[in-house]
Image: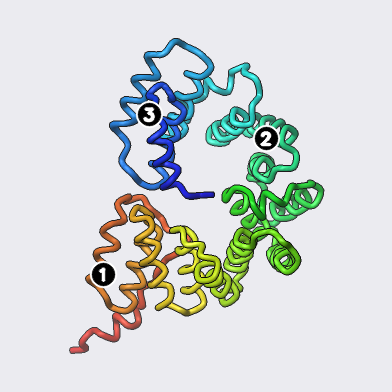
Amino acid sequence: MGDMKNAHQHFLRSYHLDAKNYLSGVYAVMTSQLIDKENMKMQSILRDSINQEEPSESRMLYKTLLNISNNNVLSSIDWLNNDYKQRPLYLAMDIVIALNLNRLDYAQKSSKKLSILLPNDILPHMMYIDSYFSELNDDKYPREVYKYLKNTKLNFADLYFGPAISRYLYIQQNLITGRLFFLREHLKDLIATTKEPLHELISSLAFASLLDGAYEESYTLYNQLIDELKVRDAKTLFLGAVASTAAGHHENAIALLELSKMKDKTFAESRYALGLLYLEIQNNEGAVIQLSNVANNSFVSEYFNFDIDTDKLLGLRKIP
């Protein structure tokens, strides 16, 4: 569902209940990184405990996942030489490691196996696209991706009701291939006819409309999600604020960002966006509070940026 804060809490509790459940510990570390939560002490304890175990397939899995989570891909190179049973997680790890080492041949081989193993799921095919087409130029990439997706039978329940990452990546590929309008129309038809709960479908349509530049439509859909369907997780509130900002409803954006921040105080995107919007209305004290809480200095917002009006600054200078 993309709720990394709650995922982290559940993995952490699972590990504390059973310190031998190393996979929960590893996932607790990985999710803590996704929410910018300090984890060095836990990492150290977990790594020491794993190193004391006898060499085994599980031990290598845990160590490799920890290395991947710390971007220490060179230390994971031995994983590519294993002869374990080809499980989906293992193949996905192969792809991630191989792509980071620029071993496209290996990434392509593993992504092909994964897409055959899970032929109808969206995520394996997104990884296949990344492995096979990432080196193509800007003109050829959209054509090849469109051709590939057109000839692939996907389970669209993944898009409508499945994992957040599948929805995000599939909509992104439709943006790149220029097919978002058609995806939006398809989602509208489905919303009008389905008897299934609407919140996931409306969430997909709202995000697709946002990326397609239909800002007022996206703004209306996110308000429907939040106000009528009561979907009020931090990410939905934040995306509603993005749509509100893009549609020119800045007061609504500030209100949604305040709610998003209350839902998840560690969500840097909400604090950063709120800081910028406070700067815009000259609430400098509020802006300082929010921006100072964006703890990760390497943070780069995926949605918000700002320009300095240098003409206005020049106009404020006194001419002698």
Answer left or right for 197 relative to 70: right
Residue 195, percent from left and from top: 72, 61
Mark 1 to mark 3 CA distance (whole Å):
40 Å
Answer left or right for 16 relative to 244: left
Q: Quadrant of residue 29?
A: top left
- State the residue at coordinates (79%, 47%): 153
Chain-order first, disc 2 or disc 3: 3
- Circle 3 sits in a helix, a strand or a loop, which is it? helix
The amino acid type of the residue labelled 2 equals Ser
Q: Quadrant of residue 34?
A: top left
- Front residue (pair 132, 251): 251
The residue singled out by tag 2 in the image is 111
Mark 2 to mark 3 CA distance (whole Å):
35 Å
The residue singled out by tag 1 in the image is 286
Mark 1 to mark 2 CA distance (whole Å):
47 Å
Could you tell me which quadrant the C terminus lies in? bottom left
- State the residue at coordinates (42%, 39%): 10
Q: Residue 192 got which mark?
A: none
Q: Residue furthest top?
A: 54
Q: Nearer the viewer, mark 1 or mark 2?
A: 1
* Label 2 Cα neighbours within 10 Å, binned few <14 / some 14-19 / many ≥20: many
- Circle 1 sits in a helix, a strand or a loop, which is it? helix
Q: Residue furthest bottom?
A: 320
- State the residue at coordinates (31%, 56%): 294
The residue singled out by tag 3 in the image is 17
Q: Look at the picture and state if 295 lies above or below 131.
A: below
Q: Nearer the viewer, mark 1 or mark 3?
A: 3
- Circle 2 sits in a helix, a strand or a loop, which is it? helix
The amino acid type of the residue labelled 3 equals Leu
Asked if the residue under mark 3 is in contact with the one under mark 1, i.e. CB atoms within 8 Å, the reply is no
Residue 134, percent from left and from top: 63, 45
Chain-order first, disc 1 or disc 2: 2
